[in-house]
Structure formats: C-alpha cells, structure tokens
Image (tube, rainbow, N blue to C red):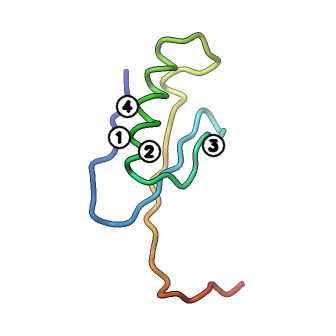
C-alpha cells in the first residue's frame, strides 16, 4: 500500500522522509518531496530491502519567516 503525499498548500513547508527511525532526506521542497516519496514507495515495494512500505514515514514542517533576524541562542 502506497501512502499518499500531502495535499499542496500555499505556505512554505519542508519535508523530512524517514525509513524506520532513520532520516533519509531532510528539508525537501514539495516537488522534491513528492518525487522522492513516490520513488521510495515503488522501490520498497519491488526490491528486496530491509524496509517495508509501512516503515516509510515523513514529517511536514512549516517554515516561519524571521524577517532577516537571526535566532538568539
């Protein structure tokens, strides 16, 4: 079963893709995310790997503009 990518939104978001607890891709824009997400789901479904489709997951992070200011640490 292929998990569906998120719906397209106007806000600035980045995506991180995981297989089990391992981050495979981070800070992807929507277009890169959709391409890699589809590719990974297909690869895991056909190739003999240590991963199952159920092991794939992603997080969606909304970027907030900081108006050019640096964060304080």
Category of crowding for the residue at label 4, using alpha-carbon neighbours closer than 10 angstroms: few (below 14), some (14–19), many (at least 20): few
Residue 6, percent from left and from top? 33, 46
Select label 3 or label 2 by which is in front: 2
Q: Is residue 34 above or below residue 30?
A: above
What residue is drawn where x is 49% and y is 51%?
28
Residue holding disc 4:
3
Q: Nearer the viewer, residue 10 or 18?
A: 10
- Whichever of labels 2 and 1 marks the residue nearer the N terminus, that label is 1
C-alpha span from label 3 to label 4: 17 Å
What residue is drawn where x is 50% and y is 20%?
43
Q: Which mark is residue 5?
A: 1
Q: Are marks 2 and 1 in contact (CB under 8 Å)?
A: yes
Q: Secondary structure at mark 2?
A: helix
Residue 30, percent from left and from top? 39, 51
Q: Is residue 47 above or below residue 53?
A: above
Residue holding disc 3:
23
Residue holding disc 2:
33
- Whichever of labels 3 and 4 marks the residue nearer the N terminus, that label is 4
- Whichever of labels 3 and 1 marks the residue nearer the N terminus, that label is 1
**Count of numbered marks:** 4
Select label 2 or label 4 by which is in front: 2
Q: Secondary structure at mark 3?
A: strand
Q: Are marks 4 and 1 in contact (CB under 8 Å)?
A: yes
């Amino acid at each position: 079963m292929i998990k569906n990518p998120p719906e397209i939104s106007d806000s600035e978001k980045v995506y991180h893709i995981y297989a089990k607890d391992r981050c495979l891709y981070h800070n992807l824009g929507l277009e890169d995310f959709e391409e890699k997400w589809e590719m990974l789901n297909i690869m895991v479904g056909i190739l003999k790997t240590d991963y199952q489709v159920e092991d794939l997951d992603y997080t969606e992070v909304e970027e907030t503009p900081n108006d050019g200011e640096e964060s304080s640490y």
